[in-house]
Amino acid sequence: MDTIFAHSSGLPPAGIAVIRISGPDAHRAGEVLAGSLPAARQTALRRLRDGGGEVLDDALVLRFDAPASATGEDVVELHCHGSRAVVRAVLRSLSELSYLREAAPGEFTRRAFEHGRIDLTEAEGLADLLEAETESQRRAALAMAEGSLRSQVEKWRQRLIMLSAQAEAAIDYVGDADETAADVDELTSAAASLREELSEWLARPRAERLKTGIKVVIAGPPNSGKSSLLNALSEEDRAIMTDVAGTTRDVIEVPVSWHGVPLVLIDTAGLRASDDTVERIGVERTEQQLQSADILLWTGLESERPAHLNALQLFTKADLSAGSSEQLGGLKVSSVTKEGLDALRGWLLSAARSLLPADRSIAINERQARAIHECAEALADVRGADLVLIAEALRAARVGLDRVTGATGIEEVLDALFGRFCLGK
């Protein structure tokens, strides 16, 4: 396998820059620059020199021996001063060594996966952690990166192994009909219990909503205060506000984070019949947004509100005396006086949290859910009196579970996953 190198810390200038080398010739390359390496897992101050003997920098050098390293290979880390000039000089000197090449994005992490240092769920958690922008995203990603789902899957796997062992033993031992029936009943009951537990996990909110945010669509007829409400909630002048009906012609999205909860506030074109081609397109896009909304804030008549599981009726002009009694039945808010905005934010936070994974819980993503579903579906086939078919169903369940951690059948996802990482990971 090639020996790779890359700048693995933040962009310079910085206080320190970490340059990582991994592969069979990592120690050899480290000795070329540093002269000698410290003992494994210890640090030492070394003067780095290029191939011509010119001083590059004074750096802390660390050495890790395979397999006890981040990648499972021999690794050297150079902790240099974080100026652009120093980083360029060290990387240039490494690139001049014929047995080294620059790492591809995510290649260090991919090698860690291939050498069994992490499983696929931990790699996915690390990718999410690098992209985390809110506190809820950080907590969920950190739990995944630290192996929380891996530990849970291993518990399920051990239960499946025990059931498979029981099935194989029952096949090998030919007893009377009563004994065989008892074996089948025990296996069927245990498989049903595990399948019920998996189904409970599948019913939980997915991790994707932590990344994309809860989609809050503000909709209603033209000139009903939608754009003003968007600006007031986001505390930004993102939408144009006029007294002219139909000002908003397109979808306007504003990502926000309130108390660590990610939301996307969406202003839409007013819903009405129109002969204007551009406005009709805007209305069509509004209808599309209504179909995909997690939460709907409705600014029109309550009798005209679209059916939605998480909808809130609003009267957006509480600062004015005018307004139908039907509208006055909703939550009164004003973008001018700020009346009701705190109550609206509180309601939105509560509704959003109910749609997100519980705080500090293990949040599975769609790929992981598909693999768990495959396992659960196989367990549904643990029935009937044929122990051979039961054993085969249990084997299929194990295959599905192994897809969660990447032990089998995940080649198609690897390039897409590790392509999300930066160069030094």
Image (tube, grey):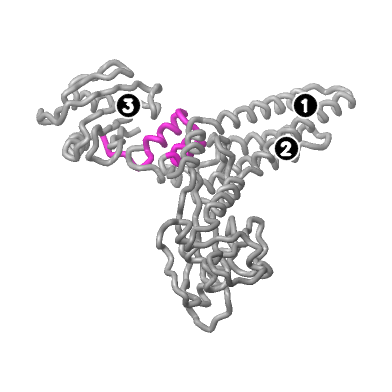
What amino acid type should be assigned to the residue bearing mark 3? Answer: Val
**Position of residue 103 in the picture relative to residue 214 (left or right):** left
Q: CA distance from mark 1 to mark 2?
A: 26 Å
Pick whichever of labels 3 and 2 is earlier in the sequence.
Answer: 3
Instruction: Look at the picture and state if 291 lies above or below 166.
Output: below
Q: Position of residue 175 (x, y in %)?
A: 85, 22
Residue in the image at 16% along x and 29% along y? 57
What amino acid type should be assigned to the residue bearing mark 2? Answer: Glu
Pick whichever of labels 3 and 1 is earlier in the sequence.
Answer: 3
Please tell me which residue lies in front, 82 or 383: 82
Residue in the image at 49% along x and 55% along y? 264
Task: Assign a secondary structure to mark 1.
Answer: helix
Which range is magenta? 100-129
What amino acid type should be assigned to the residue bearing mark 1? Answer: Ile
Please tell me which residue lies in front, 260 or 381: 260
Q: Which mark is residue 295?
A: none
Q: CA distance from mark 3 to mark 1?
A: 49 Å
Q: Which mark is residue 196?
A: 2
Write down the residue under mark 1: 171
Q: Which mark is residue 75?
A: 3
Q: Residue furthest front?
A: 321
User: Would you say residue 336 is visible in this rendering?
Assistant: yes
User: Would you say residue 370 is visible in this rendering?
Assistant: no
**Position of residue 179 in the picture relative to residue 16 (left or right):** right
Q: Quadrant of the N terminus?
A: top left
Residue in the image at 28% along x and 32% along y? 18
Q: How many marks?
A: 3
Instruction: Look at the picture and state if 217 lies above or below 402.
Output: below
